[in-house]
Image: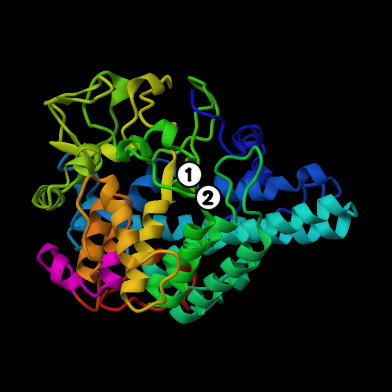
Amino acid sequence: MKKIILFSVLIAALCSCADFLDIRTEATMPSSGLDYTKTENIIMPLSAAYAKMRLEEGDALNYMAVLEIASDDADKGSSADDGPNVKEVDEFTLAPTNDCVNSVWAYFFDMASAANYAIESMDRFEEAITAEAGLQQAAECRDEARIIRAWAYFNLVRIFGPVPLIDKTMTSAELASMTVSSEDEIYNFVYSELDKAIAGVPASWDGYPGRYTSWTARALKSKVALYRKDWKEAAAQANAIIASGEFSLMPNFRDVFSMKGENSPEILMSIQSSTLGQSSGSAPICFYAFIQGPRNNSPSNMQGWGFKVPSQKLINFLDGRGDAVRKATTILESGTTTPEGDAILATCANPYYNGKVYTPSRYNKWSFNGYGFDYDMRLIRYAEVLLNYAEAVANGAPAGVLSADEALNQVRRRAGLEDATASLEVIYDERRAELALEENRFFDLVRWGKAAEVLGPLGFKAGKHEHFPIPSSQRQLNPNLPASAGYSY
């Protein structure tokens, strides 16, 4: 059985405390319910911020639509008439009324709100307690919450461009008067958050698998720096991780996405999910994998909604480069049986599904369906850190402990491929193959300036689709939000 995840027992115990866990989207704080004099309560606001990262049914589908289905590597999937909002994203016919973009907007701002509450709560703990250990814990939790807030704003800025930068709790009236900050201002804020986390969060946590560390902050900053073309910073942060010796590639690519691959030395940032060994009841479940499970498969614990399926273009790409190892894990094909003995029926609604979220039936013990309820979302892996480093060095950043070639080829060798020279095009292809269906491809194409070329045949229009539109419903709540370029409101 899967190891109990970070804060999972605490979160499950708190799920009945509506006043605490239901952090309001508008960023207001509860007026009571948390005793700031008790050091054992310090972890609770941070735990709530982690809980806000866990995707439920609707959020998971909308998240995948915006971050992956919009790319050339994934199609909507499911049945033809299911998920019309997702189809609009897939075909670039969406309007500002599309529920996918409104849901993703609310999801990340809700996450930032929970982080704001956690950060401000640490101030109150520091005012109320005197024990040195408690003060240190509050300071570390504050900086740990900054990683969550940085993740939220990094996604908001790359998805929507300029958005309001809300770094404290506010009244609804105050929020309704907020104007947007520039992309540079938001990226500078994310940098500042991560710098504080790098300095203030421990490098490891005893007994807390999956909890974010200073290495998490470095990995995220390396990723963010690529979007700013800050090659020196991207390479420096990746180099620090590589040089530490704390992380490594799992020898078997398939194992990375298995239950035993969760919280392995390859995982630097993930969203934890677990049934806690239960078959029903309250548990910190994430529906990310379930929504991608084979549609109309049998038995019931081996099926899901069948969204975000691999595109034929992705399959052709992997075949064309002889990428058999990664294809075998990434592509779950109907009419086949997995190495673990689970049948994916030929009568499933789609010919292919995302093999990276496959979970064997022996883990799927929930009373209804249960496919993938124990699956952790991998957000940043060590393989991506190596590719970040290779890309940054190939763009002129000073090399550190590895050459760009060596960083690239560590990833290629694990996939059974021959060594290659780390040109940018080779790195781009390697990133696509290694990180396929992990919500990177669309915004990689945007930041590389290749989106119009690659996605134009799918409906992408330059000058419009690099960002998703600010939702109409949010502009009704706050008239200071601008209309997004190319969209009618």
Q: Report whether residue 29 is seen.
A: no
Labelled disc at residue 144: none
Which secondary structure, mark 2?
loop
User: What is the three-letter code of the residue carrying label 2?
Assistant: Glu
User: What is the three-letter code of the residue carrying label 1?
Assistant: Pro
The quadrant in which residue 476 appears is bottom left
Which one is earlier in the sequence, the residue at label 2 or at label 1?
2
The quadrant in which residue 467 appears is bottom left
Nearest the eye: 223 or 57: 223
Q: Total label count?
A: 2
Direction from residue 257 to residue 110 in the image, left or right: right
State which region is magenta. Answer: 443-461
CB within 8 Å, label 2 to label 1: yes
The residues bearing labels 2 and 1 have C-alpha atoms spaced at a distance of 7 Å
Labelled disc at residue 265: 1
| Percent coordinates x, y for residue 448 in the rendering | 26, 72
